[in-house]
Amino acid sequence: MPRIDRYILSLLLTLFGFFALVLVSVYWINRAVSLFDDLMNDGQTALVVLEFTALTLPLVISVVLPVAAFVATAYGTNRLSGESELVAMQAAGLSPWRLARPVLIFGVFVGVMVAVLVHGLVPMARARLADRQSELAENMTAQFLRPGTFQYPTDGLTLFIRDIANDGRLLDVFIEDARNPNDQTLYTSEEALLVRADSGPVLVLLQGMVQNLTQKDDKRNLAITRFEELSYDMGDVLPEGSSKGRDLRDYGTLRLLNPDAQLLKATGATAGDARREAHERIAQPLLSPVAAMIGFATLMIGGFSRFGVWRQVLWAILGLIVVQFISNAAANQVGRNTDLWPLLYLPAMVGAGICIVLLWLASKPRRMKCGTTGDAT
């Protein structure tokens, strides 16, 4: 790599490291504060809070890196222009297309980092976070499983357990679900087991009976069903939001491209939704080189001004906003119709087109504006 490319690339990487650290810290602390309040209110320890905040860090970094690349490129180009280094480089015969090469390398480097995060670290962290949330949900469920007392987890729901055996079996379980006055159900069983499923904690009732009392048009009907084994979803017992199924973002990209029945059942999503999520991940790293090139190409337009390059900076921010707006609009359209997933790659194509036009304008020779002067008589 030529020395001039190494110089520009080292400058951009240094600025990128600084801005990425600042932006990640601000964004992460903001999310960690809300997560801290939620977990501490649930009675969790500081170690659990630290673990959960650490597991959210890869997602935060993947979101912040393209923005940090844009800021680093815009600031670095402004610095090179302010210190007349860009003028010297162009006077030596380097065109804007040639100067854009280290910037493009820098953008590709950031894109590779984002790809590693969205295809590897983020799904792993989210899967681990989902497992820990399920474990905490089970612990919260266990708080309601107190032997010898009637529990009222929610309005209209009553739970009673006579005793808990040493091996974890629940003995003589009684559940009354009277949340609907016209459709009341009583569950009784000799034994029960608390198990974990993809949708959350489930209470497996053994050797029992279900009594269902319905009322319609002043008529009451009682239906009795005996069972050897019956599953009761403990999501009704848990506080709202503490128990939920898996999310598509918890799975790897290759598995989302070819979703199986187990994945679709765990997430409650369709095959089109899974493929949409996969293509969103593939398209996301493409925005990093686009953001970097927009920050560079926009500041290359225009000549020297004692008032600075604030106009070019505003245009660069506007260009980035346009690309992000197109990205959001494409995501909304694909969310309505998953067959339109090629639209997810449109923002990167539009951003690349903007960069090409800007570099073409920057490479055009500028004419000096000269006023006419008359001959002295």
Image (tube, rainbow, N blue to C red):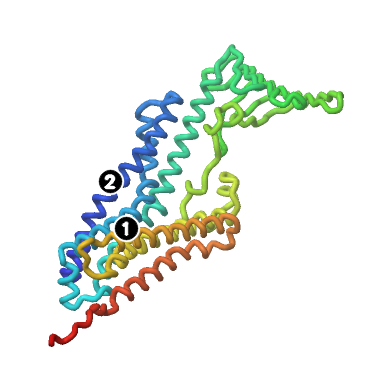
User: In the rendered view, would you say 359 is above or below 120?
Assistant: below
| Dot 2 alpha-carbon crowd within 10 angstroms: few under 14, some 14 to 19, many 20 or more | some
User: In the rendered view, would you say 168 is above or below 48?
Assistant: above
Provide the residue designation for mark 1.
70
**Position of residue 338 in the picture relative to residue 134 (left or right):** right
Q: Specify the amino acid type for callout 2.
A: Val
Instruction: Give 233 or 57, whichever is nearer the viewer.
Output: 57
**Position of residue 160 in the picture relative to residue 127 (left or right):** right
Instruction: Give 354 or 371, whichever is nearer the viewer.
Output: 371
Residue at the farthest top position: 148
The quarter of the picture where residue 292 lies is: bottom left
Alpha-carbon distance for marks 1 and 2? 14 Å
Residue at 57% in and 63% down: 340
User: In the rendered view, would you say 361 is above or below 306?
Assistant: below
**Position of residue 105 in the picture relative to residue 278 (left or right):** left
| Dot 1 alpha-carbon crowd within 10 angstroms: few under 14, some 14 to 19, many 20 or more | many
Secondary element at image label 2: helix
Provide the residue designation for mark 2.
22
User: In the rendered view, would you say 19 is above or below 323?
Assistant: above
Q: Is residue 247 visible?
A: yes
Instruction: Give 304 or 160, whichever is nearer the viewer.
Output: 304
Residue at 86% in and 24% down: 218
